[in-house]
């Protein structure tokens, strides 16, 4: 599934790198610990978090993550948006809590199963 499809189906709001929504989403990972994401996420995952600082972009870039979804109505900092634009990593936001969003992602076929 492509990122733009998730945006449409889940009503996500894109905050940056909107021209890069063609990325393929091959799985998902939900965590607020950067070290956990570095250790356990997979290339092509959609990352669900409530962290808004620019370090999330560095982690997403290192792991080749398809995009980041911020939950609970959280908004990325301006420096986070700037860095994500430079790294071409889409950041999307939703009012949904993590648990609800992950359930909806799973129902759309996005799983956390290791490849």
Image: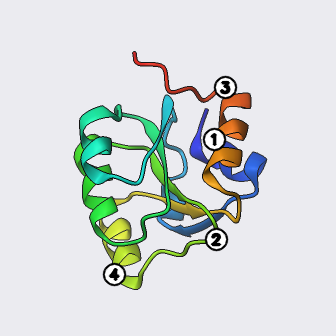
Q: Examine the image and state in which quarter residue 70 appears.
A: bottom right
Left-right relation of 35 to 41: left
- In the rendered image, the quadrant that contains the N terminus is top right
Q: Nearer the viewer, mark 4 or mark 2?
A: 2
Q: CA distance from mark 2 to mark 1?
A: 15 Å
Residue at image mark 2: 73
Using a 10 Å C-alpha cutoff, classify the residue at mark 1 as few (fewer than 14 neighbours), some (14 to 19) or many (20 or more): many
Residue at image mark 1: 102
The image shows residue 35 at horizontal and vertical percentages of 24, 47
- Residue occupying the point 50% across, 27% down: 112
Residue at image mark 3: 109
Q: CA distance from mark 4 to mark 1?
A: 26 Å
**Labels 4 and 1: the sequence-earlier one:** 4
18 and 62: which is toward the camera: 62
The image shows residue 55 at horizontal and vertical percentages of 27, 65
Residue at image mark 4: 79
Q: For mark 2, give the secondary structure.
A: loop
């Amino acid at each position: 599934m492509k990122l733009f499809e998730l945006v449409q189906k889940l009503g996500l709001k894109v905050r940056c790198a909107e021209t890069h929504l063609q990325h393929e989403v091959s799985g998902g990972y939900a965590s607020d610990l950067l070290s956990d994401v570095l250790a356990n996420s997979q290339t092509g995952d959609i990352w669900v978090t409530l962290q808004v600082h620019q370090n999330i972009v560095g982690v997403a870039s290192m792991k080749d993550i398809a995009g980041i979804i911020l939950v609970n109505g959280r908004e990325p900092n301006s420096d986070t948006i700037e860095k994500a634009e430079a790294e071409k990593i889409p950041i999307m936001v939703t009012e949904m809590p993590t648990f609800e969003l992950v359930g909806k992602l799973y129902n759309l076929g996005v799983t956390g199963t290791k490849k």
